[in-house]
Amino acid sequence: MQLSVVILAAGQGKRMNSDLPKVLQPLAGKPLLQHVVGTARELAPSNIYVVYGHGGAQVQAALGDEPVEWILQADQLGTGHAVMQAMRVIPDDHTVLVLYGDVPLIRAACLTKLVAAAAGGTLALLTVNLDEAAGYGRIARGADGHVTGIVEHKDATPEQLRIREANSGLMAAPAGRLREWLLGLGRDNAQREYYLTDVVAGAVAAGDPVAAIPVAHAVEVLGVNDKVQLAQVEAGYRRERAEELMLAGATLADPSRIDVRGEVTVERDVFIDVNAVLIGRVHLGARVRVGPNCLIRDSSVGADTEINANCVIEDAVVAEKCRVGPFARLRPGTELARDAHIGNFVEVKNSQIGAHSKVNHLSYVGDATVGSHVNVGAGTITCNYDGANKWPTVIEDGAFVGSGSMLVAPVRIGANATIGAGSTISESTPDGKLTLTRARQTTIDGWRRPLKLDPLQKAAAIDEALASGAPPPKKP
Ligand code: UD1
Ligand code: CA
C-alpha cells in the first residue's frame, strides 16, 4: 500500500497574535512545520504534500530544501477543505495520512500504528484523553460505544464539552473512501468551515468502519494555537530530549534545566550541569563533563574532556582529555587536539591547537596553527587582522610564548623557540632561540611621585600643558 502524507499548514493562526505564520513559529529553534515534515519523512511515504496558503511565500521559503510537494489552498475554508485540495493529486489506492503543521511532537512510531489501522477501508483517528480538552474536538460515541462523530469545541453542547476523549486531528484513511466522505462535507457549523472532522459522520453514514486509536503519550498530540501552548510544546520537547540523553547514559544535574535544540548524541557517563544549551549537531564523548551555563553548537567533544562553566563553543572539534574554560570561547573552525588546555577569557577562532598545548589565560588565538607542547602565555594576542586582510600565525611544536606578546601575522614562531614576555613579534623567529623585543629597563634616580594640586594650580597646569606640551609642574 502506497502512503501519501498530507500536512495542513495553510491557517493563519490568529490566536498567535504574530506576524509570523503559525507553522513557522519556532520549536527548539526550527519551524513547527519542519518538525512535522521531518517525522513524515521517517515513514518513507511516496509523497508528502504540504497544504499552504496564509503566508505562502514565507512558508515555502522557510521549508525550501525539504522534499515536499506544495498544494495551494487559496482561501482557508477549513481543515476539510484543505485536505480536499490535496486529494486532487492523490490516487484512490493510496492510504492518506493527515498531519497538522501545528501538532509538532508526533512520533513516527505512533503514526505507523495509525496507518496500519486504516487498512480495509477503515477511518483511523488518533485520539487522546485530556483532563483539560478546551479547544479540541470531542469524540462522540453512540449507546453501543461506537464512534459516531467528532464535535468541535465551538459546536459542542455543555454535555459534550464534558467528554474527555479528544480528537488529535491526525487521521489515516484509504484515499478512495476519504474522497467520498469529503464530498459530503458542508459548512453548517459555528465557524462556517468545511471541518475535516465531519468525515467521521460521513464514514459512519456510509457504513464504513471507524477506529479510534488512543495516543500513548498525550504530549505527542499537543496542538499549538497560541504562545502559551507554544511554550508547553517547547517544554515537552525539552523533556523528551533530556530523557533521550539520560537513557543514552548522560547524567543531568537537572533534566528541566537543559535545552536541546538539535541532534545531540552522548556516550556513556557524560555529566551535564545546569543551563546547558545544546544546538544543532553536538556529540559528547564518554565521560565528558559540561559545567553550568555552557552553550555548545554544532561541535564534537572527545572522551574525558572537561568543559568548565560558562563556555561558548561553536563549530569546533575538541579532542579527548582537553580542558576548556571556565569562560572560554571556541569560535568556528577551532580544533583542539588531545589534552589541549584553553583557559579563562581565551578566545580561539579558526585555529588548530596541538596536543598538550596550553593557552590558559586572557588570550586571543585567531587563524593560527599551534603545534604540540606549546605554551601560550597570558594575554598573548595573534594580531591577525591589519584592517583589510586576515593573516595566519604558525607556532611550532614546543614553543614558549611569554605573557603579553603580540604576534603580528603573518608570522611563524619556530620550534622550541622562546618569546620574551611583552614582545611585539612582527618577523618570524628561529627555532630553539630566545627572541624578544623590549625597551631596556631603566631606573630614574631622584624621581618623586606627583603631589596633589589645589584646583587653581591644577587648572593652570592643564592650560600650560595643553598650550606648550610641557609636563605639569611639580608643586613647589
Ligand atoms: C483542529 C480540529 C479539532 C482538533 C484540533 C487538534 C478541525 C475542524 N478541528 O482544531 O477537532 O481537536 O485540531 O489540534 O479539524 N488549516 C489549513 N487550512 C484551513 C484551516 C486550517 O491548512 O483552512 C491548518 C492549520 O494551519 C493548522 C491545522 O490545519 O495547522 C489545524 O487548524 P486549526 O485552525 O488550528 O484547528 P483547531 O481549531 O486546532
Ligand atoms: Ca490547532
Image (cartoon, rainbow, N blue to C red):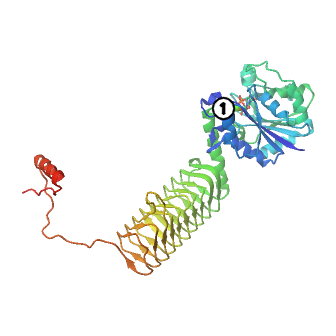
Instruction: Give the camera-side residue of 175 and 141.
Output: 175
Q: Where, quadrant-wise, is the N terminus in this rendering?
A: top right
Quadrant assignment, res 225: top right
Point 38% across, 71% down: residue: 402
Q: Position of residue 467 (x, y in %)?
A: 16, 51
Q: Is mark 1 within 8 Å of ligand 2?
A: yes
Q: Is residue 121 above or below residue 75?
A: below
Whether residue 144 is visible here, answered yes or no, is no
Quadrant assignment, res 253: bottom right
Instruction: Give the camera-side residue of 158 and 432.
Output: 432
Q: Position of residue 3 (x, y in %)?
A: 85, 43
Q: Quadrant of ligand 2?
A: top right
Whether residue 248 is visible here, answered yes or no, is yes
**Neighbour tally class for label 1: few under 14, some 14-19, many 20 plus, Cα within 10 Å:** some
Quadrant assignment, res 252: bottom right
Q: Position of residue 431 (x, y in %)?
A: 45, 80
Q: Where, quadrant-wise, is the C terminus in this rendering?
A: bottom left
The residue identified by callout 1 is 225
Q: Is residue 347 above or below residue 186?
A: below
Q: Position of residue 14 (x, y in %)?
A: 64, 27
The reply, left or right, for residue 475 in relation to residue 291 is left
How many circles with numbers are drawn on the protein? Answer: 1
Instruction: Give the camera-side residue of 256 and 92.
Output: 92
Q: What amino acid type should be assigned to the residue bearing mark 1?
A: Asn
Q: Which residue appears farthest toward the left when viewing the image?
A: 476
